Image: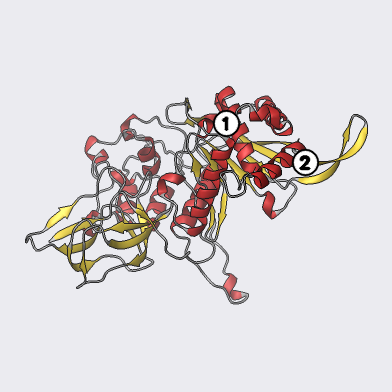
Amino acid sequence: MFEFKLPDLGEGVHEGEVLQWHVKPGDTIGEDEPLLEVETDKAAVTIPSPRAGKIVSTTGKVGETINVGTVVVVIDTGEGGAVAADAPDSPVSTVPSTAPPAASGEAAMARSAATSAPVASSAAPTAAAEVIHGTGPVPAAPATRRLARELGVVLRQVSPSGPGGRVTADDVRRFSEGGGAAVVSDQLAGDAGQSLSSLPAMGGPSIPFFEVEGLPDYSQYGSVERESIRSIRRKIARKMVSSMVIVPHVCHMDEADVTELEKFRKEERVRRKGQPGERLTLLAFVIKAVTVLLRERPKFNASIDPLREEILYKMFYNIGFAADTPKGLVVPVVKNAADKSIVELSEEIADLADKARSGTINVDNLRGGTFTVTNVGSLGGTGAIPTINYPEVAIVAMSRAEDKPVVRDGQIVIRKMLPMTIAFDHRIIDGADAARFMTALVQYLSNPNRLLVYA
């Protein structure tokens, strides 16, 4: 017998929701044939079978959430005995899922973010407590994780009593009432990759005067419906809250005269019909201009490490862009964007956007970003204030480019103007820095000849 555990599905992913089983008990499966489809908070993936044989049992119904490291299927390989397959240390190589979109309202976004506020304690955790669950993800239900965050309890320090070493809500309550130490949230410590005992105590367990209240009973006024916040949509909710709570957002707005650029872009699309570059978009030019500026202004391509109180400068330029899909917002990442031409950028943007909309994008294409550009221009609007894609420190939002009357050399003329907003982390970037960044960005887009030097 071969026991297959849910493998590591990617950076910061601890659990997945079962979308579809390709087998049932009694079926015969070949090695590398599709086993099941799982949706994480990053993407949907198809997991292949690691062995050939007969399916003895499966764990997890469609819609249920299972943790990394949980035995999801037992396969009779004909070899006899029970062999457990531990979840690999590196992410599993998976085939992107082509499953149909889940219920309306779900969405996607790349990379995890620490969401819990660290908690000071008068007692230091013992070495034994720190290694109860080793270095892997702690098996616990989402409700239990939420309770642990509310009580300031580190899940990794809690002795489990549930089946399969699962931490239960009662375990968390007993630990909390027993005065156990809680230096920092489990997720924050895990994402940082640091020992719990090495982290500094930073502030109290909560924000003064801040309390999350439950909803009133709306059912007394009429009919209501409930829908669980699952996987991808839950990740977006956590990430956005993390960004807005942790990061002091400040915005700077400006307009670029893209009249000449739009004329050039449209001419090139016609000229390149049937060739690379025929899908040339304004977004490709903006991303190219952004990469030029990031090399000159490294603060905008950095991240803040709150645990070490350091600024981390990234010497590579992976630009994420927001893509609207049937399942909501996802942020594909163009890797090494600074080394690619505008035509190459346009082709990769179009390819990644197509994959995102069809649900076949690979998890690797949704992580590793250092800066994000979001374009809501096709949907309308005169401006937008974006939320920073934490732990990045800045994001540029493009709105609709429209013909507007402007003054040039004392005369009123009609020009195509592109409204843009940069939201930035005021812990590392000052308002003057953001103003200079936007001024330079406007200049590059208003004069395509300057930008084409880097094409």
Residue nearer the viewer, 99 or 11: 99
Give the quadrant of residue 120: top left
Q: Residue at x 43, y 49 (%)?
A: 150
Residue nearer the viewer, 227 or 377: 377
Work out whether mark 1 precedes mark 2 in sequence or the reverse, and give the earlier one.
1
Q: Is residue 394 visible?
A: no
In this view, 126 is above or below 323: above
Mark 1, residue position: 291
Residue nearer the viewer, 330 or 406: 406
Q: CA distance from mark 1 to mark 2?
A: 22 Å
Q: Residue at x 40, y 40 (%)?
A: 188
Alpha-carbon neighbours of circle 2 within 10 Å: few (<14), some, or many (≥20)?
A: many
- Amino acid bearing label 1: Thr
Q: Is residue 175 visible?
A: yes
Q: Residue at x 60, y 40 (%)?
A: 284
In this view, 77 is above or below 252: below
- Amino acid bearing label 2: Met
Q: Residue furthest top?
A: 296
Where residue 98 appears, x then y in whole percent?
42, 61
Mark 2, residue position: 417
**Which SS class for mark 1?**
helix
Where residue 355 appears, x then y in whole percent?
48, 54
